[in-house]
Amino acid sequence: MVTFDFSKPQSIATYIDHTLLKPEATKHQVRVLCEEALTHHFFSVCVNSWMITTCREVLKNSKVNICSVVGFPLGTAESSVKAFETGRALNLGAHEVDMVLNIGALKAQEYSYVEKEIQSVVRAAEGKIVKVILETCLLTEEEKKKACEISVTAGAHFVKTSTGFSTGGATVEDVLLMKATVNGKAQVKASGGIRDLATAAKMIEAGATRLGTSSGVLLVKGQEAANKAAY
């Protein structure tokens, strides 16, 4: 049963990383994304790194953060490339990075490689938030647990369900599993397929503290409608 408190103004907005990662996205579309984030007080915008400068121009002097992706969407770039990409994104003005786990290395049980790679990104981030995208739809339950454990050991701040570009997105079951596995040592970001308020609320109830979605405006409007209906 969903028990998220819809009565708090902007409460859903504070969870949202307002996202536009499509390869065909234009600077105009990213500017609109940023304007929406300003209007609705979203936590951040999440974009590809070449759009960071555009976001910085629109969001200057605001509280909206800029998140950029690293090794996106496949996670198969070499570790040093991911570390360089992280440093470059932060130099351009990003406040957080969402890196894609090397899924093949995890499945091959090359755990030392996976851990060292995440560590290299964490070091390059120099204290800024690092979220590790697991791409849960491609992993077994045991692999999801192992990915969470490695991410925590490597110093990541969040584990994240999905890129939104593979065969599936966030599920309540995965969020519950990830929340239990990190056991308070990291946070959970649910991403992929969160397009309505009911789904968003279920993810929050399951333990997600951040939501990656391109439907942030719809979620806020859904909350506004729910508030009106309650009165």
Image (cartoon, rainbow, N blue to C red):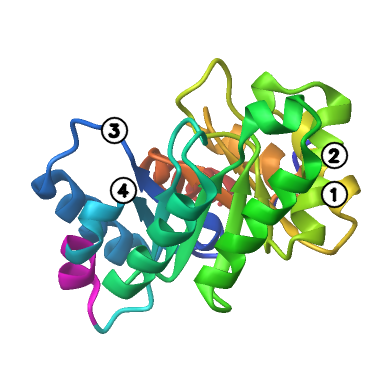
- Disc 1 is placed on an element classified as helix
Query: Of marks 3 and 4, which one's residue comes earlier in the chain?
Result: 3
Secondary structure character of the magenta stretch overall? helix
* Residue drawn at x 58%, y 34% as measured from the top left: 162
Q: Do the residues labelled 1 and 2 touch (CB within 8 Å)?
A: yes
**Amino acid type, callout 2:** Lys
Out of 6 and 107, give the one closest to the viewer. Answer: 107
Out of 222 and 96, give the one closest to the viewer. Answer: 96
Disc 4: which residue: 48
**Whole-percent x and y of residue 54?**
16, 62
Out of 225 and 214, give the one closest to the viewer. Answer: 214
Cα separation, mark 2 vs mark 4, equals: 27 Å
Q: Residues within 10 Å of mark 3 (few under 14, many from 20)?
A: few
Disc 2: which residue: 146
Q: Residues within 10 Å of mark 2 (few under 14, many from 20)?
A: some
Q: Do the residues labelled 3 and 2 touch (CB within 8 Å)?
A: no
Mark yes or no: residue 160 visible. Answer: yes
